[in-house]
Amino acid sequence: MKILVVSHPPLSAELGAAQVALNLAEALRGRGHDARAWSPEPLPPDTRWWNLWLRQRRIIERHAAAAGPFDLIDTPALSASRELARHGPLLARSVQPELRYLWLNVRADLGQHPSPRAAAHAVSGAHRAAAIVSGWRRARAILCMGSHELAWMRRRFPHWSAKLGCYLYAPQAEERAVLARVRRARQSAAAPGPGQRFLWIGRWTAHKGTAGLLRWLRERLAASPEDVVTLAGCGPVERELVPAWLRSGQVRVVPAFKRAELPALLAAHTVGLFTSEVEGWGISLNEMLESGMIVFATDAGAVGDLRPFFPVSLRPFPPPATIIGGPLEDLDANGYNQRFSWPEIALAYERQATAAIAAGPP
């Protein structure tokens, strides 16, 4: 099949959504398909927040017209337009629960900073939501990212059950080998000193559960002054934190880091934190767990899909006062390394895409 895999963000492995598109396209090529990841970036310099999605849509349509036709166009629902459908069957693949993100962000914006600009964001969000639902209606298949989002979609849109499916996510094989080395080194390392070394990774935004994280930090750091918490990939968030935490070194901020720096970051910490209220997947979960960390997580994103494979290491957030370790799971024996691999993900994707094409227009 000739497949166009659209990524709204630039095709950089440093960006989560682009990383998914790149990995998926590569895995589909491994199965013999002519699959190419493509992005409408860079956008014109006069692009603004209110016309961003419209600009993306028009550029994607022009590219599909020039490079098509395609046997399948894999696109975010926001760009699954009537014009795009003329150049190939549409598959709306999610990389995040967009409607829920929109609602959370609008609610936070209006609640914290009520203003004409916040109201304008709300109006723009309503237009985006309508476009997303129209894209789902137009697509021959809707692939959710993981079983958590799939269950939500089935509850909210039961009339689309026949075309709903899901796919999983995993680190690349090369990254997995590095994470396995960190895991082995952790198993043979001496016990750490007093206190836990916690790691939280993510953008500093409402759906990542930052309010709950701050509440937990206040309680934990007061009760356990020997603990250290690192906030990574969050941008310059020092103003959101209690100054005394930063002065004492109890909280450390790593505003940004490169993918090559991730293994050392994981190796330097003992316990992972995942606090999202709403999440697409949360690849940091896979990375922390594969590196041998205990992770305390809210029930969002990939947690439900990963829990059966990490019965010891993946635990409910928040952490208890005393954290007791346990034997690390055997990821080969329990089937994790096979199920969460790109060849397996591409095979499941191919089956769902082929069925959708055979079913004909919606």
Image (cartoon, grey):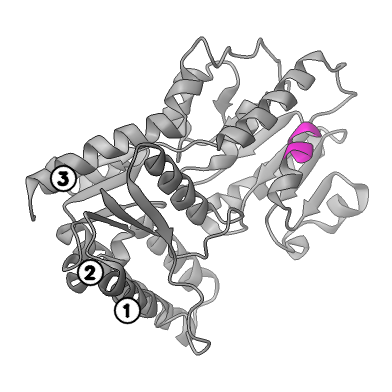
Residue at the spot of label 2:
84
First reached walking from the N terminus: tag 3 or tag 2: 2
Residue at the spot of label 1:
58
Is the residue 270 above or below the residue 167 in the image? above
Q: CA distance from mark 2 to mark 1?
A: 9 Å
Magenta stretch: residue 152 in it? no
* Callouts 3 and 2 close, C-beta under 8 Å: no
Is the residue 4 above or below the residue 20 in the image? below
Magenta stretch: residue 265 in it? yes
* Residue 167, percent from left and from top: 35, 38
Q: Is residue 19 visible?
A: yes
* Residue 120, percent from left and from top: 41, 83
The residue positioned 46% from the left and 73% from the top of the image is: 110
Answer with the quarter of the image where residue 68 lies.
Answer: bottom left
* Residue 165, percent from left and from top: 25, 40
Residue type highlighted by circle 3:
Ala
86 and 284: which is toward the camera: 86
Q: CA distance from mark 3 to mark 1?
A: 25 Å
Q: CA distance from mark 3 to mark 2?
A: 17 Å
Residue at the spot of label 3:
356
Return the residue found at the far bottom: 46
Stretch of the chain drawn in magenta: 263-268
Is the residue 44 above or below the residue 284 in the image? below
Side (left or right) of 221 relative to 123: right
As helix, strand or loop, the secondary structure at mark 1 comes to helix
The C terminus, quarter of image: bottom left
